[in-house]
Image: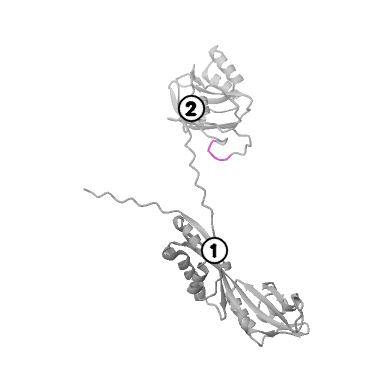
Amino acid sequence: PTPTPTPTPEPESKREVNATAKFRGYTSAISTTDLDTLKTKYLASALGANADQATSVGVTFVYEITGKQTFAALVDENAFKAAVATTLGVIASEITNVVQSAARRRLLANDVTYTVQTTDMTIANTAQMNAADTTKTVTVGTQVGTVDPSVVNTSVEMSISMSIPSSIVSGVQSTIQSTTFATTLSTATGATVNAADLSVSVAPSPAPSPAPAPAPTGISITVGAYDYKVSDPVSSLSCISLKITLEGSTDKLFVGLVSALEADIVRNKYINNQYSTMEAAVIDLNVRSAAGCDYSDFGDALCDISTRVDSSKTYYLLALNTGASAITGTIQHFGVCDGTGGSSPASNMVVIGSTTISVLAGMLLAA
């Protein structure tokens, strides 16, 4: 016998995880190899044996270079930033965290520490090199600073996003938030990682996809030869949208949506033989209808009625067959007023439900 094929399992859902980690203590130029190592070691440390299950992995890096210049006294901070930026080859807005020791206590010298922050690795390497160069003095006003190369270092803050199987999200999050994860990363990368330099967040679970809208309900109708049919009344609607599909094309059918008053007039005239022909009845019905489908509209066996109506009035659906053969088809309803299931701008639109369509399209009353 032919073996039963093993069903293919459904792919497991995934969640997006976003995390940051800062690696401190780089005293020489950083390379792309260094950055790849940070990414690889982080994934291995956070996900362990599941590292290969991370997809859509994206990383960005921010570089922070710490430096120090010593002056005899306080200096103007803006002037200092401008001077340091020129010396290091960066722009003044990238100079942050300027702290002057003389501003805190009376000292014979003023140590000014600062940070350069950039997303460009080449600029970061150049800035670190210049910040440690003792010949790169900074002049602020009449004061000339001296460089302390021993404090110069670069930190790399890595932001990483990834999609991982939902089943391991909790475990990964717990690992990153554990008290030992910083030590694990420090050992793996050779950089200094503090617990305060770590963060992790998990994107909310995606909302379940809405169930597809049910197909429009189809109600079968048959209008006999030289006959008509009228639906039960409907009211309190401001929107009526129908699709009429016949079993074949015809030029003998008229369907109209009319108010109760107009419907009574047409029916009474028909019963009292006030129409000389069915065509005359159709002409009268056409004039009185809020919307309708006349002979030519059924040339392709299809017609839509889609209109907004007065919700204070009661309406009927009338069908007149002027031919010698019965006409059969279906009527479908839509919950909007464009007849196609698309959106409607009507703020007070009333959705037609299955009960309403049974009443409106059922064509329950025969002549």
* Residue 254 in view of the camera: no
Q: Between disc 2 and disc 1, whose residue precedes? A: 1
Magenta: main secondary structure equals loop
- Eyeballing the image, is 252 above or below 74? above
* Farthest right residue in view: 142
Disc 1 residue crowd, few under 14, some 14–19, many 20+, Cα 10 Å: some
Side of 275 relative to 134 (left or right): left
Mark 2 residue type:
Asp
- Judged from the image, the secondary structure of the residue bearing numbered disc 1 is strand
The region drawn magenta spans 339-343
Residue in front for this viewpoint, 170 or 82: 170
List x then y, in percent, for residue 277: 52, 17
Quickly name the residue at label 1.
19
- Residue at x-position 49% and y-position 39%: 213
Quickly name the residue at label 2.
251
- Judged from the image, the secondary structure of the residue bearing numbered disc 2 is loop
Disc 2 residue crowd, few under 14, some 14–19, many 20+, Cα 10 Å: some
Side of 273 relative to 222 (left or right): right
- Eyeballing the image, is 132 above or below 5? below
